[in-house]
Image (spheres, grey):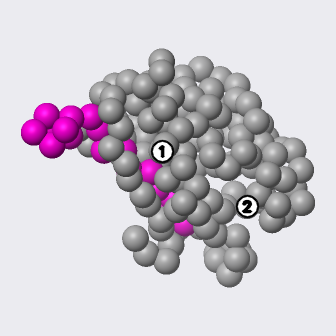
């Protein structure tokens, strides 16, 4: 980790394919969100870098900025089936901020208990210079990323 990136991980008792199915689905993002900001989503499950979907947001759950309800377009930046997915967000702020969220999936061998190590991260090293000293980042804490991984683990184990 650096002062411009946070990441956390957890071993989830599910295959990379089961986990990736949640991560590529816009409704999956809403279902596992621990921040309370993601209200709903529109769009089909993504299948390639460059795909997009819309998420309806409500920043009030964080209690940090009075942005109310707004929409963002999620732009898939990297897409490697069952291994990696990342995205950037275009929302109400102009120019777009440029921070990136993502997940990396690493199969865990049976000798080590099996399952998948899921790494969740947020990187703001390439944000637009206008936002560099804004104090906006990180929007989500490492603890929130970790909580989302807990919800993800429960989601794939009950589906």
- Please state, as top left, top right, bottom left or bottom right, where the N terminus lies in the image: bottom left
Nearer to the camera, 71 or 3? 3
Q: Residue at x 48, y 67 (%)?
A: 5
Q: Which numbered tag is attached to residue 95?
A: 2
Q: Residue furthest bottom?
A: 133
Q: Please indicate whether residue 37 sits to the left or right of residue 138 in the image.
A: right
Q: Is residue 37 above or below residue 158?
A: below
Q: Position of residue 19 (x, y in %)?
A: 40, 30
Mark 2: give few (<14), some (14-19) or many (20+) Cα within 10 Å: few
Mark earlier in primary sequence (2, 1): 2
Q: Do residues under tags 2 and 1 come within 8 Å of each other at their CB atoms?
A: no
- Span highlighted in magenta in the image: 108-124
Give the CA separation, mark 2 to mark 1: 30 Å
* Nearer to us: label 2 or label 1: 1
The quarter holding residue 51 reads top right
Q: Secondary structure at mark 2?
A: loop
Q: Please indicate whether residue 105 sits to the left or right of residue 91 in the image.
A: left
Q: Position of residue 138 (x, y in %)?
A: 61, 67
Q: Residue at x 48, y 32 (%)?
A: 154
Q: Position of residue 73 (x, y in %)?
A: 69, 40
Residue at numbered disc 1: 149
Q: Residue at x 51, y 28 (%)?
A: 155
Q: Can residue 117 be seen at all in this image of the molecule?
A: yes
Q: Is residue 60 magenta?
A: no
Q: Residue at x 70, y 70 (%)?
A: 136
Q: Please indicate whether residue 2 sits to the left or right of residue 42 in the image.
A: left
The quarter holding residue 8 reads bottom left
């Amino acid at each position: 980790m650096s002062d411009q990136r946070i990441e956390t991980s957890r071993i989830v008792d599910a295959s990379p394919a089961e986990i990736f199915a949640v991560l590529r689905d816009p409704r999956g993002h809403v279902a596992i969100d621990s921040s309370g900001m993601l209200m709903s989503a529109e769009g089909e499950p993504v299948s390639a870098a460059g795909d997009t979907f819309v998420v309806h947001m409500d920043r009030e759950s964080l209690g940090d900025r009075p942005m109310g309800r707004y929409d963002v377009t999620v732009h898939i930046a990297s897409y490697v089936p069952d291994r990696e997915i990342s995205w950037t967000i275009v929302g109400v702020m102009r120019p777009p901020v440029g921070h990136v969220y993502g997940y990396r999936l690493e199969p865990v061998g049976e000798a080590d208990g099996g399952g998948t190590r899921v790494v969740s991260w947020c990187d703001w090293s390439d944000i637009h210079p206008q936002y560099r000293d804004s104090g906006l980042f990180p929007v989500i804490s490492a603890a929130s990323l970790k909580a989302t991984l807990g919800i993800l683990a429960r989601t794939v184990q009950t589906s």
